[in-house]
Amino acid sequence: MIRPMPRNVCVLVVIASLIAATAIEYRSESQTAKSYIVQANGLDEAMALVGDVGGEVTHELGIIRAVGATLTSAQVDGLRNRSGVRRVFEDATV
């Protein structure tokens, strides 16, 4: 005969499942790359900074000393704390 799980064990299993699902969702969001504009003191510096965090430069925007780049949220956080970065903002249709 199979005995049912005690109620407190069922509650713990549900809580653990919710925590795991939330962690997986957070991890996938932080690893999803989006399009950003990274402005620095110069075009070459912007390109180097994006490369340093593992991002991909997609466009050169020399007139504003910036690059278009594909970055994850973790890479964006890494850029915002670096010397030489003037602005990092999500690219959007204007």
Image: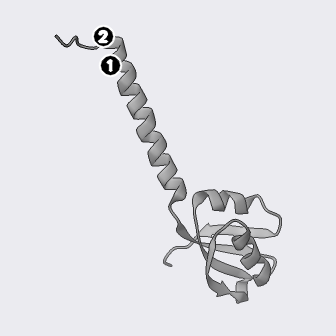
Residue projecting furthest to the bottom: 63
- Amino acid under disc 1: Cys
x and y, in percent, of residue 72 in the image? 57, 62
Work out whether residue 27 or residue 35 is closer to the camera in this orientation and state it.
Answer: 27
Q: CA distance from mark 1 to mark 2?
A: 7 Å
Q: Residue furthest front?
A: 1
Q: Which residue occupies 81% across, 77% down?
A: 41
**Residue 87 falls in which quadrant of the image?**
bottom right
The relative height of residue 2 versus residue 52 in the rendered view (above or below) is above
User: Is there CB contact under 8 Å for labels 1 and 2?
Assistant: yes
Quadrant housing the N terminus: top left
Near mark 1 (Cα within 10 A), the count class, few <14, some 14-19 or many ≥20, is few
Q: Pointer 1: what residue?
A: 10
Residue at 65% across, 62% down = 76
Q: Tell me the residue that label 2 is attached to.
A: 6
Residue 55 horizontal/vertical position (percent) = 63, 70
Residue drawn at point x = 79 percent, y = 62 percent? 82
Q: Residues within 10 Å of mark 2 (few under 14, many from 20)?
A: few
